Image: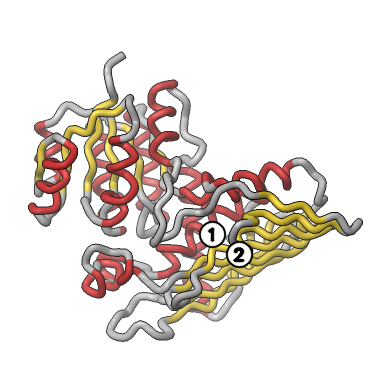
Amino acid sequence: MSKIRVAVFGCGAIAQRRHIPEYANNENVELVAFADPVKERAEEMAAQYGGTAYTDYQELLKNEKLDAVSVCTPNYLHAPMTIAAANAGLHVLVEKPMASNAEEGEQMIEAARKNGVYLMVGHNQRLMPPHVKAKEILDSGKLGKVLTFRTSFGHGGPEGWSLDGRDSWFFRKEEAVMGAMGDLGVHKSDFIRYLLNDEIVEVAGFIGTVHKEGTDVDDNATCIVRMKSGAVGTLMASWTHYRAGDNGTVLWCEKGAMKIGTVHGDEVIVELTDGTVETYKVGAMATNEKQVPSGVIDEFVECILTNTPPRISGEEGLRSLNVILGAFESQATGKIVKL
């Protein structure tokens, strides 16, 4: 069987640490081309993995015969690049947040639909081993209904992750559109929707720039969300969790509590009201410091190979984005926003 021919748009940190090596490790993929406005970055990837380097993604699309692309660029470019690739008849894996606003998200979904291609959003938190295990336990019904929860994602900020450090696009509003909420909060809105198999119907957002000087994007957000089921919880995103990063979730349910990613080594802990405690060592979450395969690339490739629409679809990405946009609206208006 011929290999899936892939190009990567954007050769920054997420491309270099996740997308490109994970494509390279997948025997069904051939990396064909790389585009980045910083020519050296694209050339470095081409030298390392084979393929052609471009500074202009449109030129790449014109010249190369492809099956799929990964869009790993600053947020404001996600929509135009995705739409251009879909219009070229290519499957697209786009990083999160999928778009800058809801209209763009809808246009991306429409472009994929009318061209008969898949659109998948890189919400890798669904695929982290502790999260997969937690969902399996919750779906089994042993904890009963979820009543309240908290979920949080924080680290010290993109300066420790991005190849450009403090000069990264993450801190420029015209390119990033949103800060910690677009980077981390949208992971959590997606994860909690997925984990609880439920939709967020109301959100109150407290969002601001607490500590990162010289930027106009948010570095902290605490949101209160109400689910369709009636469960209420908090969702937190932070770029100022210095040293003590956090990717933890706690659910309080009718028959006990579940702690996910709160104790290193015991990734999922179930404490039942009958006194039973169960711990599951199921492999760690990926962090900025410690990369483990995200699973996203393999799942995207599998969708293409088997003609299976992606579970983490454009529609799913848009629902998760709309929660974040609702939180910003709440911050701006001082009102609780109904989604």
Residue that protrudes farthest toward the front in the picture: 265
Task: Tell me the quarter of the image containing the N terminus.
Answer: top left
Q: Are marks 1 and 2 in contact (CB under 8 Å)?
A: yes
Towards the viewer: 321 or 334: 321
* Residue occupying the point 46% across, 50% down: 318
Residue 223: image location, x then y, percent: 58, 72
For badge 1, the amino acid type reads Lys
Q: Position of residue 308 (x, y in %)?
A: 47, 25
The residue type indicated by label 2 comes to Thr
Q: Residue at x 71, y 65 (%)?
A: 232
Please say if 177 is above or below 8: below
Residue 315 vertical placement versus 168 (above, below): above
Q: Secondary structure at mark 1?
A: helix
Res 151 label: 2
Q: Is residue 24 left or right of residue 324?
A: left
Residue extending furthest top? 1
* Residue 58, x across and y down, in percent: 13, 42
Give the quadrant of residue 262.
Answer: bottom right
Disc on res. 188: 1
Foreground: 282 or 187?
282
Residue 143 place in picture, x, y as percent: 81, 51
